[in-house]
Amino acid sequence: MPDYTTRGLTKWPSDESLYSIYFLLFIHSLPFQSKLLWIIIGPMLKYHIWTEGCQMNFSDSLRVASTLEGLGYERAARADDADVVILNTCVVRQSAEDKATGYLSSLRPLKKKRPDMVINVMGCMVGVKDTSKLHQRFPYVDVFSPPSDPTPLLKYISEHEHRKLEEDNREKRYTWMDSDFTLPAEHKNLVAGFVPVVYGCSHACTYCIIPYRRGAEISRPPEEIINEVRSLTEQGVKEITLLGQIVDRYGKDRPDYPNLAGLIKQLHEIEGLQRLRFLTSHPNWLTDELIDAVASLPRVMPHFEVPAQAGDDEVLKNMRRGYTNAEYRQTVQRIRERIPGASIATDIIVGFPGESAEQFQKTYELLADLELDVAHLARYSPRPGTVAERHMADDVPDEEKWRRFRLLEDLQEQILTRKHAVYLGETTPVLFEEKVKKRWRGRNPTNKLVFVESESDLRGQLLPVKINWTGPWSFIGELV
């Protein structure tokens, strides 16, 4: 037992005094910034983020987490343990919206039990317009934030009891889009990161809700993007994927900005960056200049995401895609002629309004002929406010949508089983991202998923791997 008389105490301290001493010792042990947070605002509060949807949402959630941790919050693994719960939502498909609604409904009893807990909904479920209907539908939600903009949440926190900092510091808290941000604690070892370059979309396909929820297309300043990529690589990120609803349209709204090919050339020179990718492309704006940039720059990976959506010209016209079956095939041919061995991913929607069995067959033949590396499949679901929802009958029965979906799924599995067999015995460079159970998971330049067993720490390492087994969705190999 310590001798408190050496500190000027003439008797044993009371329990209350002991707690004060322990608290001061605890504060003394903290780093300087954490001391200030404890002194100014008390014990750390906790946040929990639930993310659904695309890579853009993942990127947004990462920034929100970074901003909250900069304010002294720490991550909670469960919503039950959090003071602030954020749902970053997606409504591109009905299934994604149903998932968000279900999770949000499950928070209602928790909010009733803990009324001081802050619930924030952000992302495409909120959109960029009036949120009054959402307030009526979910009265227990404290704040709604548009996609890629947590300012309403930060203002709410600032104006309520959860964080009372001096007025002069408040403005600093809203600069969440600073290109120089710190990765949150959970992602300190992030190997592959995402950087948005274009927000919103102005193309407006008839089935797509994105323009209505994320607004018109806006390109980020190139210097902001360059600084962000540089900042991430300095924090250990090895691979960056540039994001945009139509990423090839970067700079179209700003004549003083470079195009995507020009931006990629600048990013390619950043020290520490090992790999660079971009998505999602559109056949109308995937230029020869951009393909040449991928072909000529060794750090830019030979992988393209180019959605076809359908194989029939009338369906494509009704979707307002802006190209024909033949033109899509020409796009694939241009890539393969310039970069032999490049991988190409696509998106397909089955059961679009009015799609007949014969029209679906043309989509089937398109995939069978082109033998693409990835096919993201979806069954059409009408999205509120879109042209298709307002003017086209959802007339393909759900069971028929499922039948077409499974036909394409089976076809793609056969194609990839055959295509991937050529990798057997070959050696490919793999950038390892994380350990899943006993195996390290990584990707090769053409975005193939590769697993390797190793007791060593492979995170962030780019290593040659000999492929010993191939399946339609992944490979297994050994370090060379």
Image: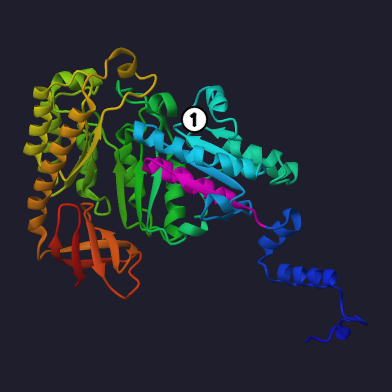
Magenta stretch: includes residue 63: yes
For the question of whether residue 411 can be seen, the reply is yes
Specify the quadrant of the image occupied by residue 457: bottom left
Q: Which residue is more in the foreground, 402 or 134?
A: 402
Q: Would you say 111 lies left or right of 419 here?
A: right
Magenta stretch: includes residue 368: no
Q: Which residue is more in the foreground, 374 or 381?
A: 381
Q: Would you say 287 lies left or right of 48 here?
A: left
Q: Which residue is more in the foreground, 374 or 399?
A: 399
Q: Would you say 215 lies left or right of 241 here?
A: right
Give the image location of residue 128, x and y in percent.
49, 26
Give the image location of residue 226, x and y in percent.
42, 47
For the question of whether residue 149 can be seen, the reply is no
- Residue type at mark 1? Val
**Outermost residue, right direction?**
10
Give the image location of residue 245, x and y in percent.
34, 34
Q: Is residue 424 above or below residue 277?
A: below
- Residue under the image location 84 percent in, 68 percent down: 16
- Residue under the image location 33 percent in, 22 percent down: 204
Specify the quadrant of the image occupied by residue 424: bottom left
Q: Tell me the residue that label 1 is attached to.
A: 126
Where does the magenta region start and end? 44-68
